[in-house]
Image (cartoon, helix red, strand yellow):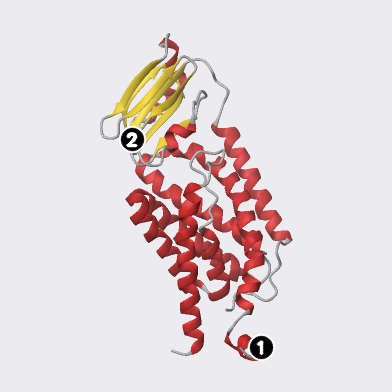
């Protein structure tokens, strides 16, 4: 009723400022998040915060399938250059549609199963160990 | 209850049911390039109700939409829809009333779409952990485009829908 219905314009200068600010901030977040590290890759599968499976991608000679979750039967295809989900019992299939991830920081998420599959660099994982030190 | 209340009630109900239908239609549409991203068509009636009838009406539509997601797509989708749509309703209302007519329909739509994503991210952070943060910038860029679309459509719908009230019809002799 009283939300400025009568004179509201379709698009104003402030709208353009919001849009540009959002696009710039998300592009910056993308640059920070992904790096082009393609060696020493490690795949880590977490379910509800707990790590349930890890593998070094460099050690993989031939593509292999791994079933990582008993509750939802998520089947991973681990290759030398990336990881993809080939089958999942979940309802939305977002994880399967994500396709193959191959760079550090990329993640496949299966929300119904509460599973996250993330690619990390093996060098970076030592830093994570230090992060766990509590005084 | 006077006639204005009855009309608000009826319109809120109509918009809520169209939100339910739109969310079903949206599931049938092909996937957007970013996994998990959706067009946010169901946000359209929420914004229409909000800009025409205020926050009470908007929240009713948002809650009904979350309830439909809960019973058709399960508790995970329900929780995501609830947090996303409640946050986006509040943010859209704040943007709408902040300084009248400073923001246009497109700005409100973008603010609603981005805050919908952020509300859903709060739930998925809680469920999975920080790993989902990887998707946030991609979803935000998608939200800018879908929000612009929603705002554009609403700039056509809202003036048409809320120019018509009971007096309008009476003057026309209906």
Q: Secondary structure at mark 2?
A: loop
- Asked if residue A126 shows in the view, the reply is no
Give the x, y percent position of residue B161.
61, 73
Judge left or right: residue B33 versus residue A10: left
Front-most of residues A89 and B136: A89
Q: How many marks?
A: 2
Q: Is residue A35 visible?
A: yes
In the rendered view, would you say B132 is above or below B90?
above
Picture quadrant of residue B94: bottom right
Residue closest to the far right: A13
- The spot of residue A48 in percent (x, y) is 32, 38
**Closer to us: A129 or A96:** A96
Q: Residue furthest front?
A: B174
Q: Position of residue B8 (x, y in %)?
A: 50, 79
> Closer to the camera: disc 1 or disc 2?
1
Circle 2 chain: A
Task: Depth check: give the residue in front, B145 or B168.
Answer: B168
Can you tell which mark lies on residue A89?
2
Give residue A90's position: percent from left, percent from top. Answer: 35, 38
Give the numbered dot on residue B172: 1
Q: Is residue A30 left or right of residue B60?
A: right
Name the residue at 48% across, 62% down. Answer: B19
Q: Residue furthest top?
A: A61
Q: Secondary structure at mark 1?
A: loop
Q: Which mark is residue B58?
A: none
At 60% across and 42% down in the image, what residue appears? A26
Q: CA distance from mark 1 to mark 2?
A: 58 Å
Q: Quadrant of the N terminus of chain B?
A: bottom left
Q: To which chain does the residue with label 1 belong?
A: B
């Amino acid at each position: 009723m009283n939300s400025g219905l009568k004179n509201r314009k379709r698009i104003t200068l402030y709208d353009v400022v919001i849009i540009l600010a959002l696009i710039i901030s998300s592009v910056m977040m993308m640059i920070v998040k992904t790096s082009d590290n393609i060696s020493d890759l490690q795949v880590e599968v977490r379910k509800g915060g707990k790590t349930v499976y890890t593998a070094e991608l460099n050690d993989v000679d031939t593509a292999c399938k791994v079933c990582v979750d008993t509750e939802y039967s998520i089947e991973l295809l681990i290759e030398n250059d990336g990881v993809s989900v080939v089958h999942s019992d979940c309802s939305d299939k977002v994880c399967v549609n994500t396709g193959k991830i191959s760079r550090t920081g990329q993640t496949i998420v299966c929300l119904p199963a509460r599973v996250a599959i993330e690619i990390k660099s093996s060098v970076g994982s030592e830093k994570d160990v230090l992060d766990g030190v509590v005084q | 209850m006077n006639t204005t209340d009855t009309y608000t009630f009826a319109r809120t109900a109509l918009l809520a049911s169209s939100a339910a239908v739109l969310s079903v239609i949206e599931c049938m549409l092909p996937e957007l390039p970013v996994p998990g991203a959706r067009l946010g068509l169901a946000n359209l009636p929420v914004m229409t109700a909000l800009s025409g009838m205020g926050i009470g009406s908007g929240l009713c539509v948002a809650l009904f939409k979350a309830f439909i997601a809960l019973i058709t797509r399960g508790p995970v989708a329900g929780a995501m829809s609830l947090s996303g749509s409640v946050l986006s309703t509040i943010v859209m209302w704040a943007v709408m009333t902040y300084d009248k007519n400073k923001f246009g329909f497109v700005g409100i739509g973008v603010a609603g779409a981005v805050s919908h994503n952020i509300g859903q991210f709060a739930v998925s952070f809680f469920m999975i952990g920080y790993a989902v943060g990887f998707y946030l910038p991609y979803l935000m860029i998608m939200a800018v485009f879908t929000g612009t679309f929603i705002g554009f459509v609403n700039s056509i719908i809202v003036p048409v829908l809320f120019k018509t009230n009971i007096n309008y019809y009476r003057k026309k002799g209906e």
